[in-house]
Image (cartoon, rainbow, N blue to C red):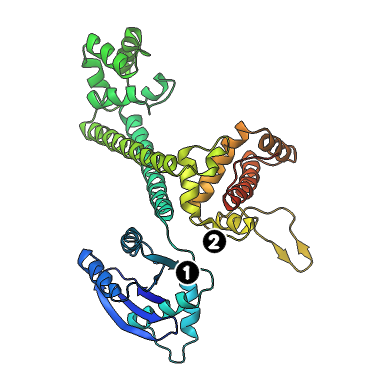
Amino acid sequence: MIFVGIDIAKLNHYAAVISSDGVVLTEPFEFTNDGDGFKRLSSELSDYAPEPVIIGLESTAHYGDNLVRYLVANDYKVCVLNPIQTSSRRKNRIRKTKTDKVDAVVIAETVMMQRFRRFVTFYDLDLMDLKTLGRFRQKSIKQRTRLKIQLTSYVDQVFPELQYFFKSGLHQKSVYALLKEAPTPKDIASVHMTHLSHLLKASSHGRFDKETARQLRVLAQKSVGNSDSTVSIQITQTISQIELLDSQIDKVEAEMTDIMKFNDSVIMTIPGIGYINGGMILGEIGDIHRFSKPHQLLAYAGLDPSVRQSGSFNAKRTRMSKRGSKVLRYALVNAAHNVVKNNATFKAYYDKKMAEGRTHYNALGHCAGKLVRVIWKMMTDDIDFNLD
């Protein structure tokens, strides 16, 4: 059996090949992080066919993702190692040396010494995609939230009465359509009544009628806002950015939904978990077998209780640690909220925590912790949701 260690970098990688006896068969060589470099690696490895080849590389941000996808697509057996594993082996070497060439050999030796190896599959690649998409979605939502806050401040300057006129607030399609065409009270007051009525009716799907348009026009005529063109430009541009983010988020969610439908995960049998929340949870967890016990997954999500102890004092009630993956914690708490609405057992558990004097979010945190244990059990045993 042949073992290959690859040291990942941004522009160039180093690979070394050793035998099952630890003998270096191919000295570390450099190859570029592009198509030509990947082909060179395949050419070097083809010399050892039909001998089984196992490739190992460290988990280093996103720099090795393309290489992993290439190798898996070409039917290579690939192991992604925790850098802690290679670090401990590196420390055991007699000479204190750390170079890309040495690291490639160390990685190959680490793979060779592993008793239990888990190879990357196409399902793992889907999980990587879910993780990337889920985190991009969260960033986009945060950007959109900031823009909505900015838009509110701009409208407060130009037309402060507007946000109280619409019961559902400023952030709806009909208001955006109005402000894009007439961003100031002066502009709204000058719009012909027939056009204003049609604009509101079409953008709200008939919810706002001609009477609403008439009242709005009267309000605009009486407004104390500042019809400054500089602020009106900021309003129209901010709305365009919000709408762009809306379309991006929709595309991300559609892609996540397609991946979830294709893989048909067991966690989708939990009532209340949808494709988006489920996708974020699976993407952040990755390989469930990394967690030998549910409390490890709980700690990774930051839902485990923090510890406060000094001398004989030991706090009975503490806050959650909030360490680990923020995205996973958000998705689990959000999922727990929906599961409580759809499952009697979780609802009873939530009510019990509320009866103990917990706050709403504290009780949801406990439900999220219970949900983590259920998810770990389901995924490790590959069983559908059942609390009976």
Q: Is residue 119 left or right of residue 8?
A: right
Q: Is residue 319 left or right of residue 219?
A: right
Please name the residue shown 57% across and 55% down the image. 302
Residue 384 in the image: above or below residue 321: above
- Asked where in the image residue 17 lies, by quadrant, the reply is bottom left
Please name the residue shown 40% across and 19% down the image. 165
Disc assigned to residue 20 = none
Residue 207 picture location, percent across and down: 38, 14
Q: How crowded is mark 1: few (under 14 residues within 10 Å), some or many (20 or more)?
A: few
Helix or strand or loop: what does disc 2 sit on? helix
Residue 162 picture location, percent across and down: 36, 23
Q: Residue furthest front?
A: 50
Please name the residue shown 50% across and 78% down the image. 113
Q: Which of 41 and 57 is in front in this view?
A: 41
Q: Name the residue under label 2.
A: 290
Residue 80 in the image: above or below residue 122: below
Q: Is residue 249 visible?
A: yes
The disc, 2 or 1, on the residue closer to the chain's N-terminal end is: 1
Please name the residue shown 66% across and 42% down the image. 363
Q: Which residue lies furthest to the bottom in this view?
A: 94
- Residue type at the position of mark 1: Asn
- Residue type at the position of mark 2: Arg
Q: Can residue 12 be seen in this view?
A: no
Residue 276 picture location, percent across and down: 45, 40
Is there CB contact under 8 Å for labels 2 and 1?
no
In which quadrant will I find the C terminus?
top right
Q: Is residue 247 left or right of residue 309?
A: left
Helix or strand or loop: what does disc 1 sit on? loop
Residue 48 picture location, percent across and down: 32, 76
Q: Which of 35 and 202 is in front in this view?
A: 35
Disc assigned to residue 82 = 1
